[in-house]
Amino acid sequence: MHSNDNYILLLSKKHSGEISPDEQAALDEWLAQSPEHSLLAAQMKAVWEQAGSYQKEFSPDLDAAFRQVQDRIRAEERPPLRVVSLGSRLLRIAAALALILASVWSYREFSAPDMMRAVAGAETRMLSLPDGTDIWLRQNAEIAYPTHFDGNERHVSLQGEAYFEVAHNPARPFIVDLPNGDRVKVLGTKFGIRLDPALNQTMVFVRSGKVHFSPKLQPNGVILTERQKAVYDRNSTQLTVDKYASLNELAWQTGGLEFVRTPMEEVVSDLERFYKVDITLRNTAMRACLHTAPLTNQPIEKVLESLALTYQFRVEHPAPGQYVLSGGDCQ
Amino acid sequence: MQSDPEIAEQQWLTALSAGDESALRRIFDRHYALLLGDIYRIIPDENTCQDLAQEVFVELWRKRAELDIHTSLRAYLRRAAVNRALNHLKASRRLALDESVEQLHVADESEREIAEKADRDSMEKALHAAIDALPEKCRLVFSLSRFEHLSHREISEKLGISVKTIENQITKAMKLLRQALARHADLSPVVILALKYWWGM
């Protein structure tokens, strides 16, 4: 009765990009059978494509709507009233508990915590601190941290390069002490620190959240937020901030490269750095072309192949470790 | 480089995380109407759309200190709105677990209905009216596939309905929409021939 239903489904799958090779073959065969099938396919394509612009336009009263949002926020922030009645028995238990807690606290407060030391050898090493903070140490990096965190601040000290995902705790800031008295202070966030002894530089890169980086000789320091990078040059005591640093500053930790509306010029330099190759982008018009791709660590040949497919680049490989991209169309 | 609006949004988010309510207002002004449109594609009821879209901003405020947005703000809010809409549908049990394979024959009545709703100005308008006229579940499944780019399997998981039912609904939606389009274009043999070349098939 509805013999074409199955093919209508296959056409929908084709448009939504989930058709399998077998299904595609069956569809091709059916299309070749009759011009009516091709017409049906053309109509389905038109339906799919024209539906794409469907979006009902709203022009709401923004003032009124925002007041409703505010009302909801106020209602949520007002804590509900609770009536608490404690029996005398419960009170006695609470008092005993308080006494125990107080003695634990004083023990912790007055006995200095033991310091632990972790060193990464030839490979990246990950460790978790008692407060839930995760740290990835890059080759040869070293970190010292207490067995438990006391007082109002969480202190660790770092040599080398590391990436931090700090457990959020506004009451106890997390502080990374660096050699030379420089420090990085955060509440809860994801960021990387690289100490480069050869250049005598320190780099701080923030993936998310907020970080206060204060070199000893620049006590006011600088506050960095998502995707910002600061470089402190100890020779010149210059502190420079890059407000839109590459996402891939931390590629050693994520294990690959990702791009979100990244200009091709920057894509190429990230690829060069990560794969340690040399890439020439011939067509200057392509430099600003914005590229988006999920995290990948495929071989460089594969990465270039898919760039070539997307943007119609011609790829040449004149010598080992050297690639030339020419042509290209940034539609 | 990022465009100016994106830079502004970065700054708003920074201010928001510091507890600045005027930043929330700026984000709200730019995104509220768009979110209404996003939710409407899933739940075509304006009151529900307003309710759910406002909740998205209440949540943005609640989570302001630990926001971790890796996409554009637009994509983040849209995803939040769609998830909210789907949870709403689940909670209100509007999606009966209807596993029966539905009769795919299209009744004359709904054809007429669609044709009447169809705006004569343009094919696109006619098609959009036809989307609104689709049966409720059919419209929902089609929207999630077409606009939210979810696979049939993902839709099945999100709605708790079998893949087979999803596929039936998609097929049904495509057939109904094609009819609306065909009716609108009043396909004569000449038009059919033109269409064939126009759409390159």
Image (cartoon, coloured by chain):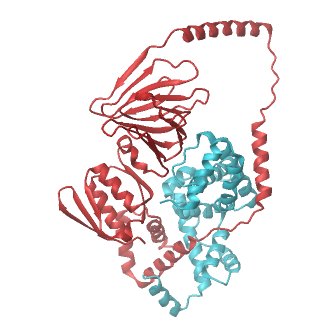
Q: Is B61 on the left or on the right of A154, as rendered?
A: right
Q: At 29% from the left edge and 70% from the top edge, which residue is drawn?
A: A326
Q: Is residue A38 above or below residue A89?
A: below
- Residue drawn at x 62%, y 64% is B139
Please state the horizontal and vertical placement of residue A209, each as a whole percent of the image. 54, 41
Q: Nearer the viewer, residue B158 or A319?
A: A319
**Hey, which quadrant is residue A173 in on the image?**
top right
Which chain is rendered cyan in the image? B
Q: How many marks?
A: 0
- Relative vertical location of residue B62 with respect to residue B135 in this rendering, above or below: above
Residue B58 x, y percent position in the rendering = 70, 46
Question: Can you say whether A186 is above or below A239 in the image?
Answer: above
Q: Which residue: 34% across, 35% down?
A: A138
Look at the image and tell me whether residue B83 can be seen.
Answer: no
In the rendering, what colour is chain A? red
Q: Is residue A276 visible?
A: yes
